[in-house]
Image (cartoon, rainbow, N blue to C red):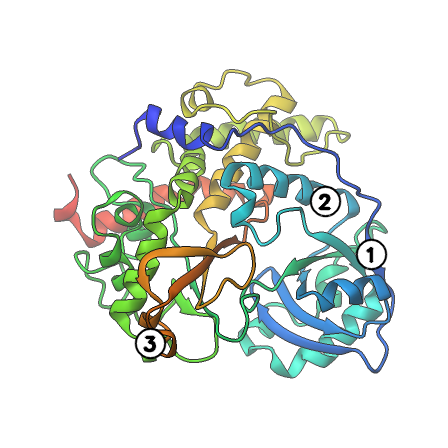
Amino acid sequence: MALPGMVLWHCLTSRSVAMARPKADYEDFLHLESLPETAQVTLVGEGNLHAVVLMANTGNSALDKLLQSGKLIRICKAPVSKRAAIERTEHYLVVSRALGGEYLPDERPPRIVVLSREVLREVYRRIGPSRLPKRVAKCPSFEGACYATITSEDLCHAQIMSNIATNGGPDTITFELKPKCGIRAIPGYPCRFVMQRSNDPDFDLAKFYDPHELYFGQDMKGEVEKLFDQRPRGFLKLRSPGTLSNLPRDAVCETIATVLRSTPILSRLAALQHYASIDEKLPDFAAELWEWLMEQRRQDSSIVIEHHYPDTLPTIEDFRAFKALHDVDKVTEWLSIFLLGRMSMDVSLFLSFSPGAGSPAFRRVEGVDVGELFPGHSGGPLWCRLTVIDTDPKPFSKLPFYFGQLAKCKAKFIKNFPAAVG
């Protein structure tokens, strides 16, 4: 069930989403050519596309100054040219306007640092023993991943970002919640996440987490409780030391739900998600545009396909009624917005709670006693910082996968729950 157009447009206009691309100092890249033996390198976390490391004493005074202020280095495990790094910076500005810079790790686009082959080899050597086997299997070498082509411009551009898991101090508890897409693109069917997981072992449609209900339902706490109880845990995790199951379930779920109810972040994510989930036919239309764009590129190798956005994001109605089917720039722009919608489906929310305001980014949680999460501080206020992460632009190479995903999810759900369709 889609949001009414007026409500959806309010989600966008409430942010004054003017997408004019302000100039950034793209020449202000930091470069790290080597690491001294005294350098400290610690693996903080690793996903399919990035590895996050904590570093100190790098030998680069400007970089060390940033790292001493609580910053981390986020290494992209793929070749990133200077042009692509600039594109990612501009994309960050777009996301900041749409979601609110106060909800991103940094108000300004992350500073970029160029890591040499030697540095990548040394980073890998030092953190190798800490990597999970499944990560090693997917990426045996950072150097090999970052310098996968011989193009001289393919340099590893890493980002310097805030350490959002610990920036509130030692008394901070941080949770990661992956809300997924809350839009029901097909009338009579649940949202794609529920359909996609419908053949999981022990799947129970009535008890399974439903993103649509988290975004638009009346029992937000109930949906958070489903995530808390889910095994194995993949969509609600404790990012601080300890174990989620050792924390008070009712207090954790009520506190998280209170924060989500009091902020506009879910409505803003939903507004973006509609750009990739308006209806069942949208993926087919996107596939037609992509096929045409690929044909133009085959005929003219000078065409460069990269993310770019209009000065103002269109209404959902205008986006769906797109007519410029034979304009390379307009088609690329349309597909960029489609990918922006896909990005918003896969973000994570970091919720950091503390008995004190660890930074100006923390906001007081009204109606919740700090003692619910921090028994030694009963009677005082609870503070929270909500941060959206994993907002990198989705690559155009992922489009063919996205085109068929909704139809596959629908077919899977019909097979598993034919009686629930209608």
- In the image, taking residue 152 as reference, residue 356 lies left or right, namely left
The x and y percentages for residue 110 are 68, 51
**Residue flagged by tag 1: what amino acid is it?**
Leu
Tag 1–tag 2 contact (CB < 8 Å): no
Q: Mark 2 = which residue? A: 84
Q: Position of residue 421 (x, y in %)?
A: 17, 43
**Which numbered disc, 1 or 2, marks the residue that appears first in the sequence?**
1
Which kind of residue does numbered mark 3 sit on? Leu
In front of the other: 329 or 8: 8
Please name the residue shown 56% across and 77% down the image. Answer: 132
Asked if the residue at tag 3 contacts the one at tag 1, i.e. Cβ–Cβ closer than 8 Å, the answer is no
Q: Which residue is mark 1?
A: 30
37 or 65, which is in the foreground? 65
**Distance from Cα at disc 1 to Cα at disc 3:** 41 Å
Residue receiving disc 3: 247
Crowding at mark 1 (Cα within 10 Å: few <14, some 14-19, many 20+):
some
Quick one: quadrant of the N terminus?
top left
Estimate the x, y position of residue 49 in percent, counting from the top left.
Answer: 60, 59
Query: Relative to 260, is 40 on the left or the right?
Result: right
Q: Nearer the viewer, mark 1 or mark 3?
A: 3
Q: Marks 2 and 3, Cα distance to the nearest angstrom? A: 42 Å
Q: Please state which of the two labelled residues, at mark 2 or mark 3, is closer to the viewer.
A: 3
> Crowding near pointer 3: few (<14 within 10 Å), some, many (20+)?
few
Q: Position of residue 355 (x, y in %)?
A: 44, 68
Q: Quadrant of the C terminus?
A: top left
